[in-house]
Amino acid sequence: MTQNDRMQYRKQKRLQRSAAIWSALEPFAYLLPFMVSIAIFTLYPVFNVVLMSFKEGFRMLTGQYTAIGLGNYTYVINDKYFANALTNTALYVAFVVPISTVLAVVLANLLNRKVRGMALFQTAYFLPMVTSITASGLAWKFMFSRDFGVINQVLSWFGVDKINWLQAPSWNIYALIIYGIWSILPFTIILLLSGLQNIDETYYTAARVDGAKSGRIFFRITVPMLAPTIGLVLTINTISSSKVFNELYPLFNGRPGHSYNLYTVVYYIFDQFYSKSKAGRAAAAALILFLIIFVITMLQQLIQRKWTH
């Protein structure tokens, strides 16, 4: 082999190595903008909140703090307003998630049928998704009015006395739950409709041939086949309901209930951060909420896995 041939060979090897290196790095080059944005807008804020939760006496504008410790967590755990927020949030989740899921299963099953005019009903049920939460909240505020609200008018047909939904503290939580169920239904129905449309029609045909009634088909075929989607819905709705805030704000003019009796955890975080300028306490409350949601989600996944298998 001549000197020129050896040089050509080495040059070709270098080009092959460069091509191999670029081929290995090319996917990372495409992912780099996404990874940078995740690091800046997701990982850094999470890390900053965790760090902030341990800074006692933290001032947001100056970045100064008095000490590093568990003082923020101690204050939040012993705060009666945070205890009230946990109780109200738990009640909200306990009512809204199962009731909305049951209603959504029934409504999605009805909307999945091929009958004339079904597109109109589907549009009506999905309208809350494209309506401003503030606008719909104000509409519900008028509907909950004691003297002129539609809800009390309907209840009066059944002999029920007028209920002071928004001014009587004992009824505030129920008004929030009713509004919460309505606001979460459209998204839940969409998920369940997608699950229903993935069920093979052969199962229904075979059941009808065997003489099975509609109710039996629903509970023996539809619900079991829809179980994975229902599990997903329960997980998503539990997470979103635990962060209830937008539904609360328009009903009570930005207050947590008529007598400040309806704190939720997210409203408590908002109040500590914006109203009281206690960023460290707000961060501590946010992390406690995250841990609670994480534990509940893991338990749901475990139960769903055992249920499936």
Image (tube, rainbow, N blue to C red):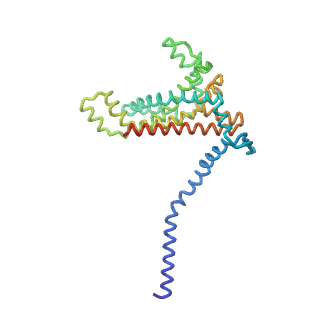
Residue 84 % position (x, y): 61, 27
Q: Would residue 18 be visible to someone looking at this image?
A: yes
- How many marks can you see? 0
Residue placed most toward the observer, 127 or 66: 66
- Say which quarter of the image contains residue 228: top left
Residue placed most toward the observer, 192 or 38: 38
The quarter in which the N terminus is drawn is: bottom left
Furthest residue toward bottom: 2
Residue 67 % position (x, y): 72, 43
Relative to 204, is 253 on the left or the right? Answer: right
Residue 114 % position (x, y): 36, 33
* Image: 134 above or below 55: above
Relative to 279, is 196 on the left or the right? Answer: left
Residue appearing at x 73%, y 39% in the figure: 57
* Image: 150 above or below 55: above
Q: Would residue 194 be visible to someone looking at this image?
A: no
Relative to 30, is 81 on the left or the right? Answer: right
Furthest residue toward left: 210
- Say which quarter of the image contains residue 177: top right
Residue 51 % position (x, y): 65, 45
Residue appearing at x 32%, y 40% in the figure: 200
The quarter in which the C terminus is drawn is: top left
Residue placed most toward the observer, 130 or 57: 57
Residue placed most toward the observer, 174 or 197: 174
- Say which quarter of the image contains residue 131: top right
